[in-house]
Image (spheres, helix red, strand yellow):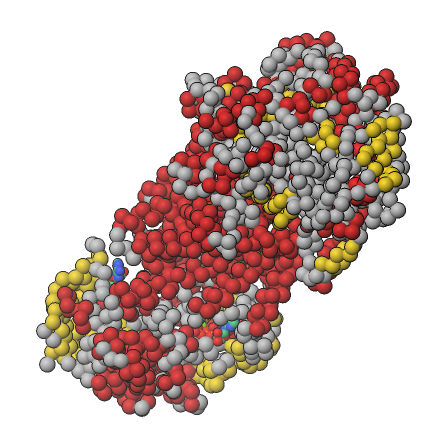
């Protein structure tokens, strides 16, 4: 298991006192900006932790480093929710005293309205789970077209909200952390323009916002630590600049001139430039956080397509893969770890290590050739499909490394680059899905469910598009096991069984896991209490201080 | 004059119309779908169709283009969410990606690209003309040699290579300058200049080479002309001949080049802006292309096309203003 | 004229380097195999993975096997990548220039020799091409064409299709002046058909200005290719080009300066050599220039 | 009193001796002409007087006690001024004419801005620029050629110099304008008392305008003395040859006007003018405006007129190069546009530009033969080359390797190659030296006799036409104002314009030249 949050807590967490951290201006230097500051359009908890400074949700991430941070914690609600009806009904009560930035109290109706907005096609982009989970949500078109609202969310009073689900979902408290669970006052909703000034329920409110460029947050006077124990909200002001080059961001953080001493980044992982300076005990070493975002980079076989319908081919290629070169292509061992399991190594996901087709550090071409020969396959030519852009890690760099590894095993690889914008579209339609694609899967919350269900649940093969079960694998036994785990409301018990399921499916070589992600972030000289949360591996801005 | 302007305007409009139609057609033929991107992860086909409808990309392409043209000339209405948004003419639509009006986006980015172009142009002109004059007046032979060499070198370096070296030298090694970050002129002129200095230098290294050569050649050519001989024959001092007569003729070709160059910096600023991380229209374009943000791509292309058309016309007008012999036609 | 060129030291130096580069591009496979390397093989053992994948050893991992070291992040042989990179960088520039000249001269001469309407029509098209923001359009174009089209060829075509305006304008202008020359009139009086006039009387007169212009286009196109590859819309991996190498070098410029330095130097040298050749040609072809410049 | 003394002047450019021991004297207020063919060192000498020549100079040039080879700088523009050949380029295009004159005046007199302007207007008036006060504000390109030359002369006299050097001041001008400028120079010399050094390749120009003359050849003076003597009874062979080469009227040939070969019927050519500024379209240029002519078999028709009267346009229409806007041109009854090549050929004015610089002359001559279907024309071309007085070995040479006269011979060879029946010559000798001109004229005459050709001979030079033409048509503003047998037109001109033209023709006989001048004024 990777470094987790341990390194960072020891360096900066020790003598931190949230009571005296107030003041100063925090600068955030980011590569990608926030396209839409609308809670309905933000995917789960995206936006580099910034949205959670504005949008409180029913539950939220437990803002701790390491394992503790991978749990959900009550936010607007008083607890993680009360399941009933075998985890098909979830009831939440709102805590007292919570207000919007304009002082109006937050009611359960506001939460419901916020969720309804995320169904509107005018506001696309949010997490899709509720459409599947909520009863009768499949053809709900949002409050603009259907002002009557959705029936399966009930608000018996201003403090209570009840969700009626189609099937048992033990992970509901995790989903309730998604930004679409943030309250939106109906009176202030201006549709697509709402994001110009979304009404805050968190410690800050928007002073100015330019999509993808800048965001300035100032204190929300109607928020206090009395109604929110999780966020420290130390800086008085947060200035986010986006659209910067990663190398420039890191160089500025290293140099730390002027305001840059108070700067952090939530999306520019250090590059080789800085890694080369990160010797143990070096000055710079004290200014990094190391975290892990549960995500796996893998090669997905389409088992409905020759030659990948032949398990021997999949096994041979699994032997041939050279994970070291993939790791190096993505920035080296400091930021990537070789992975032989589909589940990444986080405890919350319940990973159980396995390596059924040992390829060693740099591939076992001899074994691969042998397997192919046994299957009577020589002169094999396969096509590897990848994105044309490297930013997601599924681009030409990794594809070239894969190509080279397979070449060593005597397999000729044709690379097929697809425009990044349409990549998911092409591979997500079984009709257009190529035989072997390079792709990545990240957890929407730290649990095995969102990791395994879309990929291996046979009932999730969506022929019209948006499919993630690229193996097109459908085993009733596996489907049944998934349902069974879903009904569990104890995360620890669930994790154990998810891990076992992963280990079982792994034997089939439906995918070739390549690497899991490690995140190393630099921060400015004056920044205190900077640690990566245990949920996404990013800096938790809600607790950072510059004083 | 009026007739001339009229013809230029009509010609320019035709060019721009053709350009926009071209881009529209290209993106229509392209296999990408902006709605897929907007819809996000786990988007179902039904929802995709609804999103496509909401974004207005479900109509046939010619209809979309027609609406687009309407937007430019008379403005148009978008009914999204609970309200109807009116986009007044000239309306270039809304970004698929961020839902901002494209006109706002462009106006927002233009000052950056313009600052870049203007400063670089002034710097290049100063360096280029200065060096060209020194070399062209043939006062110092060694200087002529050096300028000549630099001119050739200037032709042979791509801007991103210069940019890389400048960043390495001034921001990393010497740390004399901050990493460029755009500060609006209105916020702090000094910071504005300080931050743009490196990009200016990078562009000037390349641009001034052409100016130096042109000035030098122009000067030597003009000095060889008959009317200069006349001036000499009438005892007019060399210095006066140089400043009052030769320079005028020598700098004439620069007029055209300068106007066209300003346009080309603004339009091809993609590289410089990427290199130095400046939020100008070049950066806007690269992002938009990657996100199939059609309204923004067309908007940028139209704007840059407009700048080129205007700059060319301005160059001709300027030329006519500076050279009494030129007749506009 | 040849003698004048050979006396021009800059031209000779430029021509030698340029010829060398073209030779390198053509013989890339041979050179790489001489070095015992190819441009795709990964050498993980030569990289320091913990430090982001920088080559182990001095000067980016220079060794007897890897003459110029290896590429950070992959360990691919830099010498092999550089010589193959020449293939793309020089090849695309040459092909694009050739296409531009072909297209531009055809349209330009047609406009110059054609009647009033043909000239007006073609001139407007030339204006349109000249009004297209080249880099902007190239990026858009390259982003939307299918990714599996042969990339270098595509680059050459895109650069040429967007960039032939200048050649056409010059050809048209030259044709218009040449056409007033009495020797063209003499040919017409003798009853020569127009296409023969174009070939026999106009084209030879175009060689000098077009050759000179093309010699300058070549480095320009090379910069455009490098720029597009730098922006990530150029050639696709594992094919190397100098622009693409420089682009990936931007993240390495402190950790492995050799990686910036080598392609940068080669690109600069090649461009410089082309510029020198162009300069020499211009001087040689234009006696007025010859006098003015020397 | 001697103003200027030149003694043993030698000027060289590298190892080329441009002026080789030249000596002459010019008295104050006097006038001296230097004549000689192209390249004989005339301009070089003139520039040396102002210390402007880039060559190496030795010898002695004394200007009223001042050594000009070292001290010309101070006198330039004040005491010695110069009028250059090319009025088109000799003035700065960016400054108004008045400003340029005023600048020179202020520089040398230190006068006030206002005074300088006034002086500029005054001298412009002196050179007969109409409405000088307004015209002083015009740019050179708004002046006609003659006006520009006047402006240059105005600049020359602005500072009341003691010596005016005029280097071919009239070569670029029409005969009538040339006459006016020469008259003006004479007038200026008389009224200001300045001495005049007049350089020309044209004996006729110096004949009427100078008291002394120096004949130059290869940088040396071959003969010098009083104009009246040198041009009437020359002693040097070269001077004699020069005088011989001057076109002389020829005995009229008895001519039977046969069938008209080429018929031109009410032909017009209008060039539309580009719309400039104004919204209304300007009227078209009527280059040729209703010409009716016949060219008969075997005759030589001369067409004369000043610059811009439509001579070239008419000539080009005759060979079908330019389509008439209206009217008909027929050759043997067939429309000319369908009859090229074999029937009609053309010889052009500028022999250099009429030969493709990138092809050998043999190839150029072979072209029409090939088009006529000759397979291997080399032998025929060689014969043609020899016929026009060139060696067959010239076949593989390029135009720039030949002299002007040789190039024109090539042009003629090309024209006769397809055995045409009519050759239209557009100013075929205008760019040639007198001696070469005489040779080419003789060649054309010979060929006409031998091949039984018809010739149309376009020229602005009345003397040339008088020598070669059987009939002459006088063109003015695109129309024929007079046409008739040569002798008749020359001796009894009917139209006023013809008379004016004839009066302006420079003649080499100084007495006659003075008579004509008196006639003009
Ligand atoms: N700047 C120069 N450099 C080299 N040679 C020159 C230069 N100026 C003149 N010459 C040469 O000197 C000789 C005399 O030239 P010059 O111009 O005096 O002749 P010219 O009698 O005025 O002839 P034209 O009637 O053609 O004007 C010519 O052979 C010419 O080539
Ligand atoms: N292609 C053209 N387009 C417009 N105007 C023209 C064109 N060719 C000739 N002209 C005009 O027609 C008039 C007659 O020109 P042309 O060349 O026939 O005169 P020319 O008598 O041969 O004069 P020169 O003695 O100067 O050769 C001039 O005013 C000229 O400007
Ligand atoms: Mg001369
Ligand atoms: Mg003419």
Spot occupied by residue A533 in the image (x, y as percentages of width and height): 64, 28
Quarter containing the N terminus of chain A: top right
From where the camera sits, is residue D316 visible?
no
Q: Nearer the viewer, residue D494 or A112?
A: A112
Spot occupied by residue D459 in the image (x, y as percentages of width and height): 41, 75
Q: Is residue A539 above or below residue A38?
A: above
Q: Quadrant of residue A476?
A: top right
Spot occupied by residue C38 in the image (x, y as percentages of width and height): 53, 22
Spot occupied by residue A413 in the image (x, y as percentages of width and height): 66, 23
Q: Is residue D450 left or right of residue D123?
A: right
Q: Is residue D208 above or below residue C267?
A: below
Residue, x 82% and y 39% (percent of image)?
Answer: A159
Q: Quadrant of residue D127?
A: bottom left
Q: Nearer the viewer, residue D223 or B77?
A: B77
Q: Is residue D111 above or below residue A50?
A: below
From where the camera sits, is residue D183 visible?
yes
Q: Is residue D289 left or right of residue D98?
A: right
Residue, x 34% and y 79% (percent of image)?
Answer: D98
Q: Nearer the viewer, residue C276 or D60?
A: C276
Q: Is residue B11 left or right of residue D91?
A: right
Residue, x 51% and y 48% (percent of image)?
Answer: B182
């Amino acid at each position: 298991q990777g470094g987790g949050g341990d390194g960072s807590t020891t360096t900066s967490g020790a003598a931190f006192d949230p009571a005296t951290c107030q003041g100063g201006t925090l600068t955030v230097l980011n590569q990608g900006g926030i396209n839409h500051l609308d809670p309905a359009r933000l995917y789960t908890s995206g936006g580099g932790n910034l949205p959670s400074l504005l949008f409180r949700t029913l539950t939220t991430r437990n803002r701790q480093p390491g394992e503790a941070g991978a749990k959900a914690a009550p936010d607007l609600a008083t607890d993680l929710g009360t399941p009933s009806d075998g985890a098909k009904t979830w009831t939440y009560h709102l805590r007292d005293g919570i207000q919007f930035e304009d002082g109006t109290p937050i009611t359960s109706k506001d939460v419901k309205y916020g969720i309804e907005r995320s169904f509107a096609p005018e506001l696309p982009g949010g997490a899709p789970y509720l459409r599947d989970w909520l009863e009768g949500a499949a053809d709900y078109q949002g409050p603009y077209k259907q002002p009557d609202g959705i029936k399966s969310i009930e608000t018996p009073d201003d403090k209570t909200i009840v969700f009626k689900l189609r099937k048992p979902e033990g992970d509901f408290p995790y989903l309730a952390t998604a930004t679409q669970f943030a309250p939106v006052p109906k009176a202030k909703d201006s549709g697509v323009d709402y994001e110009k000034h979304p009404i805050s329920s968190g410690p800050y409110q928007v002073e100015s916002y330019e999509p993808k460029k800048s965001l300035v947050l100032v204190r929300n006077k109607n928020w206090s630590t009395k109604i929110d124990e999780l966020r420290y909200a130390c800086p008085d002001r947060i200035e986010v600049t986006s659209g910067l080059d990663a190398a420039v961001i890191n160089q500025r953080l290293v140099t730390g001139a002027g305001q840059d001493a108070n700067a952090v980044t939530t999306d520019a992982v250090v590059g080789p430039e800085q890694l080369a300076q990160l010797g143990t005990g070096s000055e710079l070493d004290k200014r990094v956080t190391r975290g892990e975002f549960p995500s796996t980079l893998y090669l997905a076989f389409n088992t409905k397509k020759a030659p990948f319908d032949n398990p021997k081919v999949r096994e041979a290629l699994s032997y041939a893969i050279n994970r070291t070169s993939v790791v190096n292509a993505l920035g080296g061992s400091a930021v990537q770890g070789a992975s032989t399991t589909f589940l990444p190594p986080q405890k919350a996901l319940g990973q159980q290590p396995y390596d059924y087709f040992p390829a060693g550090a740099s591939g076992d071409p001899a074994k691969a050739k042998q397997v192919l020969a046994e299957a009577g396959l020589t002169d094999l030519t396969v096509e590897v499909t990848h994105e044309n852009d490297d930013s997601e890690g599924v681009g030409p760099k990794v594809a070239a490394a894969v190509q080279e590894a397979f070449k060593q095993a005597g397999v000729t690889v044709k690379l097929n680059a697809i425009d990044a914008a349409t990549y998911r579209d092409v591979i997500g339609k079984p009709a257009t899905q190529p035989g072997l694609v390079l792709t990545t899967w990240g957890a929407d919350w730290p649990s095995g469910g969102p990791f395994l269900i879309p990929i291996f649940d046979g009932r999730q093969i969506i022929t019209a598009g948006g499919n993630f079960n690229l193996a097109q694998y459908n085993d009733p036994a596996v489907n049944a096991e998934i349902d069974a785990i879903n009904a569990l409301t104890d995360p620890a018990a669930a994790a154990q069984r998810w891990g076992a399921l992963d280990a079982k499916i792994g034997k089939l070589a439906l995918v070739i896991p390549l690497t899991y992600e490690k995140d190393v972030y630099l921060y400015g000289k004056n920044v205190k209490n900077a640690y990566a949360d245990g949920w996404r591996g990013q800096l938790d801005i809600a607790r950072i201080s510059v004083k | 004059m009026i007739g001339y302007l009229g013809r230029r305007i009509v010609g320019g409009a035709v060019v721009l119309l053709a350009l926009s139609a071209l881009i529209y057609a290209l993106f229509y033929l392209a296999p990408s779908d902006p709605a897929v991107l907007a819809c996000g992860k786990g988007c179902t086909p039904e929802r995709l169709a609804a999103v496509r409808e909401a974004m207005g990309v479900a109509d046939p392409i010619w209809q979309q283009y027609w609406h687009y043209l309407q937007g430019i000339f008379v403005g148009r209405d978008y009914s999204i969410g609970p309200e109807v948004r009116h986009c007044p003419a000239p309306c270039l639509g809304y970004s698929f990606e961020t839902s901002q009006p494209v006109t706002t986006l462009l106006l927002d980015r233009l000052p950056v690209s313009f600052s870049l172009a203007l400063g670089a142009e002034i710097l290049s002109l100063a360096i280029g003309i200065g060096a060209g004059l020194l070399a062209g007046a043939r006062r110092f032979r060694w200087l002529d040699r050096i300028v000549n060499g630099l001119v050739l070198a200037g032709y042979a370096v791509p801007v991103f290579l210069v940019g890389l070296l400048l960043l390495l030298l001034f921001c990393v090694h010497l740390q004399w300058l901050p990493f460029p970050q755009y500060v609006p002129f209105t916020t702090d002129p000094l910071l504005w200049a300080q931050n743009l200095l490196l990009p200016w230098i990078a562009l000037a290294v390349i641009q001034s080479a052409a100016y130096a050569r042109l000035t030098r050649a122009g000067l030597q050519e003009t000095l060889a002309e008959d009317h200069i001989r006349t001036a000499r024959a009438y005892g007019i001092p060399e210095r006066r001949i140089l400043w009052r007569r030769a320079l005028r003729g020598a700098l004439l070709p620069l007029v055209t080049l300068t106007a066209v160059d300003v346009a080309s910096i603004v339009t091809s600023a993609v590289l410089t802006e990427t290199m130095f991380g400046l939020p100008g229209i070049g950066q806007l374009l690269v992002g938009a292309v990657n996100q199939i943000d059609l309204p923004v791509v067309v908007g940028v292309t139209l704007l840059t096309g407009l700048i080129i058309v205007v700059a060319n016309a301005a160059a001709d007008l300027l030329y006519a203003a500076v050279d009494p012999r030129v007749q506009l036609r | 004229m040849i003698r004048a060129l050979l006396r021009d030291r800059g031209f000779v130096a430029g021509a030698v380097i340029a010829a060398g580069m073209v030779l390198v591009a053509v013989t890339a496979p041979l050179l790489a195999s001489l070095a015992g390397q190819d441009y795709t093989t990964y050498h993980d053992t030569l990289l320091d993975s913990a430090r982001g994948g920088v080559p182990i050893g001095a000067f980016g991992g220079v060794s007897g096997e890897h003459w110029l070291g290896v590429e950070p992040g992959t360990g691919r042989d830099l010498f092999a990548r550089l010589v193959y990179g020449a293939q793309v960088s020089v090849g695309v520039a040459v092909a694009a220039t050739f296409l531009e000249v072909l297209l531009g001269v055809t349209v330009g001469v047609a406009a110059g020799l054609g009647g009033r309407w043909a000239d007006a029509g073609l001139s407007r098209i030339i204006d349109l091409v000249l009004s297209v923001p080249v880099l902007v359009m190239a990026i858009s174009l390259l982003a939307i064409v299918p990714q599996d089209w042969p990339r270098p060829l595509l680059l050459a075509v895109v650069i040429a299709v967007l960039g032939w305006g200048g050649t056409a304008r010059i050809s048209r202008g030259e044709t218009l002046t040449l056409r007033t020359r009495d020797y063209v009139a003499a040919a017409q009086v003798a009853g020569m058909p127009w296409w023969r006039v174009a070939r026999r009387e106009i084209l030879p007169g175009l060689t000098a200005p077009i050759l000179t212009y093309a010699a300058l286009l070549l480095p320009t196109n090379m910069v455009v290719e490098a720029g597009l590859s730098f922006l990530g819309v150029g050639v696709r991996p594992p094919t190397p080009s100098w622009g693409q190498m420089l682009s990936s070098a931007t993240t390495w410029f402190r950790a492995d300066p050799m990686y910036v330095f080598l392609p940068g130097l080669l690109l600069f040298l090649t461009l410089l050599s082309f510029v020198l050749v162009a300069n020499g040609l211009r001087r040689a072809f234009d006696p007025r220039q010859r006098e003015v410049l020397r | 009193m001697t103003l200027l003394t030149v003694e043993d002047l030698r000027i060289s450019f590298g190892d080329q001796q441009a002026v080789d021991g030249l000596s002459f004297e010019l008295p104050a207020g006097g006038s001296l002409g230097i004549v000689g063919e192209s390249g004989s060192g005339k301009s070089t000498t003139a520039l040396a007087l102002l210390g402007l020549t880039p060559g190496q100079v030795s010898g002695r040039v004394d200007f009223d006690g001042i050594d000009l080879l070292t001290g010309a700088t101070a006198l330039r523009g004040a005491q010695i001024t110069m009028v250059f050949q090319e009025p088109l380029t000799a003035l700065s295009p960016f400054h108004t004419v008045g400003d340029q004159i005023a600048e020179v005046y202020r520089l040398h007199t230190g006068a006030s801005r206002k005074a300088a302007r006034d002086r500029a207007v005054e001298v412009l008036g002196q050179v007969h620029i109409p409405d000088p006060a307004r015209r002083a504000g015009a740019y050179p390109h708004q002046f006609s050629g003659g006006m520009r030359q006047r402006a240059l002369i105005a600049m020359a006299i602005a500072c009341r110099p003691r010596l005016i050097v005029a280097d071919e001041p009239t070569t670029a001008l029409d005969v009538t304008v040339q006459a006016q400028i020469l008259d003006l120079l004479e007038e200026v010399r008389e009224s200001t008392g300045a001495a005049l050094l007049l350089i020309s390749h044209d004996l006729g120009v110096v004949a009427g305008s100078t008291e002394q003359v120096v004949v130059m050849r290869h940088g040396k003076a071959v003969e010098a003395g009083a104009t009246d003597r040198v041009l009437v009874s020359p002693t040097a062979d070269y001077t004699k040859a020069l005088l011989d080469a001057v076109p002389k009227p020829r005995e009229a040939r008895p001519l039977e006007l046969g069938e008209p070969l080429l018929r031109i019927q009410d032909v017009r050519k209008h060039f539309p003018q580009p719309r400039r500024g104004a919204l209304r379209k300007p009227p078209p240029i009527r280059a040729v405006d209703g010409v009716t002519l016949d060219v008969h078999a075997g005759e030589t028709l001369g067409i004369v007129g000043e610059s811009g009267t439509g001579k070239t346009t008419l000539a080009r229409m005759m060979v079908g190069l330019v389509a008439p806007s209206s009217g008909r041109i027929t050759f043997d009854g067939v429309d000319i546009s369908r009859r090229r090549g074999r029937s009609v050929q053309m010889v052009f004015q500028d022999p250099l530009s009429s030969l493709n610089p990138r092809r050998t002359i043999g190839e150029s001559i072979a072209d029409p033969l090939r088009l006529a279907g000759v397979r291997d024309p080399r032998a025929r071309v060689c014969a043609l080359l020899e016929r026009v007085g060139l060696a067959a070995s010239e076949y593989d040479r390029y135009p720039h390797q030949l002299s002007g006269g040789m190039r024109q011979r090539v042009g003629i060879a090309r024209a006769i190659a397809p055995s045409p029946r009519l050759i239209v010559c557009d100013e075929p000798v205008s760019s040639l030296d007198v001696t070469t001109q005489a040779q080419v004229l003789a060649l054309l005459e010979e060929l006409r006799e031998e091949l039984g050709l018809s010739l149309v001979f376009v020229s602005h030079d009345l003397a040339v036409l008088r020598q070669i033409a059987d009939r002459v048509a006088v063109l003015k503003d695109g129309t024929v104002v007079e046409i008739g047998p040569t002798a008749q037109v020359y001796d009894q001109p009917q139209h006023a314009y013809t008379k004016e033209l004839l009066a302006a023709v420079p003649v080499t006989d100084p007495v006659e030249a003075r008579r004509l001048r008196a006639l003009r004024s």
